[in-house]
Image: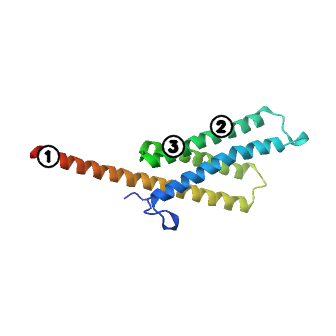
């Protein structure tokens, strides 16, 4: 059994239900995030609105990342519905990459920005723990699904051998 594995999701629900809830929550966040980015950009007015190209590029990048996140959340839910390990793994790897980038940026900001407070650090640690747990839940479901498929294939092979021997 892998070290980072759980048998049930939080509150005792099944891994399948947990992955479904994770996918739905991810979809909601992926819909709201780009909306928030656009609202924030529009609200910047006058002297507050940066004129540099990198700020506009940042907002465009955030919108694109939100759309890509949305596609991967759909992949997770479709993968769950169809028991497709590759679709669910695509979401898993995308989320691992996002967590890695956000962690690197978070640690970089600790040294660059002087106004980082203890509250920021606690919030970052809580989000890191939540994302890590979500990754463990999805990975655990994928491992369980792989085992079920292996067992089903083994049973089919046994039945096929028995039919041939008859």
Residue bearing mark 3 = 75
In this rendering, the label closer to the viewer, 2 or 1? 1
Assign the N terminus to one quadrant of the image. Answer: bottom left
Location of residue 7 with respect to 54 vertically, above or below: below
Where does the image place residue 79, in percent across and percent down from the top left? Answer: 46, 45
Residue bearing mark 1 = 163
* Disc 2 element: helix
Query: Gap between marks 2 and 3, in whole Å?
Result: 17 Å
Give me the residue at 54% from left, 56% from top.
21
In this rendering, the label closer to the viewer, 2 or 3? 3
Location of residue 18 with respect to 34 vertically, above or below: below
Where does the image place residue 148, in percent across and percent down from the top left? Answer: 33, 53
- Asked if labels 3 and 2 touch by Cβ distance under 8 angstroms, the answer is no
The one of 42 and 99 positioned closer to us in this rendering: 42
Q: Is residue 73 left or right of residue 45?
A: left
What crowding class fits label 2: few (fewer than 14 Cα within 10 Å), some (14-19), or many (20 or more)? few
What crowding class fits label 3: few (fewer than 14 Cα within 10 Å), some (14-19), or many (20 or more)? many
Q: Earlier in the sequence, mark 2 or mark 1?
A: 2
Q: Earlier in the sequence, mark 2 or mark 3?
A: 2
Asked whether residue 94 appears in the rendered view, the answer is no
Where does the image place residue 100, in percent across and percent down from the top left? Answer: 58, 47
């Amino acid at each position: 059994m892998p070290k980072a594995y759980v048998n049930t999701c939080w509150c005792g629900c099944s891994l399948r239900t947990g992955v479904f809830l994770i996918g739905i929550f991810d979809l909601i966040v992926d819909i709201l995030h780009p909306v928030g980015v656009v609202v924030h950009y529009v609200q910047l007015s006058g002297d507050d609105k940066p004129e540099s190209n990198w700020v506009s590029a940042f907002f465009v990048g955030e919108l694109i990342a939100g759309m890509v996140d949305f596609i991967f959340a759909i992949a997770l839910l479709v993968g769950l519905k169809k028991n497709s390990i590759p679709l669910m793994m695509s979401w898993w790897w995308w989320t691992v990459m996002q967590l890695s980038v956000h962690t690197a940026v978070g640690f970089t900001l600790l040294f660059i920005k002087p106004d980082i407070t203890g509250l920021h650090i606690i919030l970052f640690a809580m989000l890191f723990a939540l994302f890590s747990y979500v990754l463990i839940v999805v990975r655990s479901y994928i491992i369980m699904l792989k085992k079920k498929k292996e067992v089903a294939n083994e049973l089919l092979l046994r039945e096929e051998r028995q039919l041939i021997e008859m």
